[in-house]
Amino acid sequence: MKKDLIIAVILWFVFTAVGEYWAFNANMFPIAAAEEAVFLDDAFRLLIILAMPVFTLVLTFLFFSILRYRSKGDPDSDGPPMRTNTPLAAGWLAITTGLAIFVVINPGLKGMAELSANPNADLVIQVTGEQWHWDVSYPQYDLTYQRATQIALPADARVKFELTSTDVIHSLWIPAFRLKMDAVPGRDTSFYVTPTEIVDTEMDSNVRVQCAELCGTGHARMQMAVRIMEPDEFEAWVAEAKAMTMSGDMEGMDMGSSSDSMDGMDNMDSESDNMDGMDSGDGDMDMDTDSGMDMDSGDSDMDMDSGSDDMNMNSDSDG
Ligand SMILES: [Cu+2]
């Protein structure tokens, strides 16, 4: 029995060493395109490093017991009764409880406080979720995009996303940032992010907005391309976007080009194609739900409109 315990402990050390080597070195995360992504990846890695000895201890004793104390043939009686080893159980409870409390505080509470500690933002982006699209505006630049297909971001700037919803709960998630925040009707939520990498959706599909709260039949297609640019490139983009808004040239809108960058995504193409004429916040061009409903009131088929996002029937209501 004593010998068995020594073997089990040695196995535990070996498995832990292998597991920790993996936890410290494995390339386990997708592209990290923001400071916060690196921060959160580090936190996640720390959790794995701390959990590894607990994980390997349980597995080692489980599999060692299964193999070593296996009954040969049909057992004709019960094994010897197991008695609780109180100090061992108490020690196990204390260590695992201590570890759990530790990670709740750090990186949990401490990390969340750090992420939102600085209330200053270089750029504010307001995003409103609606079944099943996002409206995006840049209040500092007086730019508004209804049914936006893309978000443009400058690198190395602290960006504040301000979120809300007009109908049900949506959630704005950008995998490459590791950040996700609910957009709740009647409430304002926000998060901060500092993009660092010059990437876009075309280069890596993790660099995209994806709705992460099941919000109806069009949920899976509540996506937007994300484009992170050099700061001067972003300024040029803003200037061009403003010029386009002034001249009313909707087709030239850069937002429309995001249909290209979403190419890899099913269904997105047909949807964003329909969006081309709708990107600007300009009231004249609006084909939003309200005007759509008006048009439809004389129409025989109400479903066409309410389902338009979802059913790819926009071309009908566009005309
Ligand atoms: Cu959704």
Image (spheres, rainbow, N blue to C red):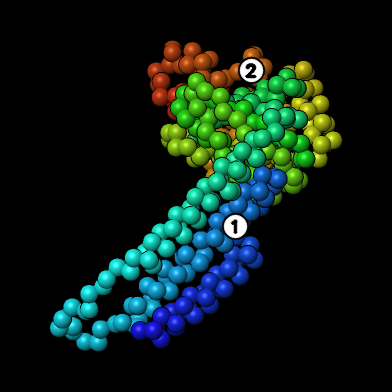
Disc 2: residue Cβ within 8 A of ligand 1's nearest atom: no
Looking at this rendering, what residue extends furthest in the front direction? 87
Near-viewer residue (226 or 184): 184
Callout 1: SS:
helix
Q: Residues within 10 Å of mark 2 (few under 14, many from 20)?
A: few
Q: Amino acid at mark 2?
A: Met
Which circle, 2 or 1, is nearer the viewer? 1
**Mark toward the start of the polypeptide (2 vs 1):** 1
Which residue shows up at 55% across the image and 35% down it? 181
Near-viewer residue (37 or 63): 63
Q: Which image quarter: residue 318?
A: top right
Callout 2: SS:
helix
298 in relation to 134, above or below? above
- Is residue 171 among what the camera can see? yes
Residue 68 in the image, given as x and y percentages of width and height: 35, 83
Which residue shows up at 55% across the image and 46% down it? 105
Q: Amino acid at mark 1?
A: Arg
Q: Marks 2 and 1, Cα distance to the nearest angstrom?
A: 48 Å
Near-viewer residue (124 or 250): 124
Q: Quadrant of the C terminus?
A: top right
Residue 246 in the image, given as x and y percentages of width and height: 77, 17
Q: Which residue does the numbered mark 1 point to in the structure image?
A: 45
The circle drawn on residue 285 is 2
Q: Quadrant of the N terminus?
A: bottom left
Which residue shows up at 38% across the image and 61% down it? 90
Q: Count every numbered label the image shows and give the total.
A: 2
Residue 107 in the image, given as x and y percentages of width and height: 59, 48
Near-viewer residue (34 or 128): 34
Residue 185 in the image, given as x and y percentages of width and height: 49, 23
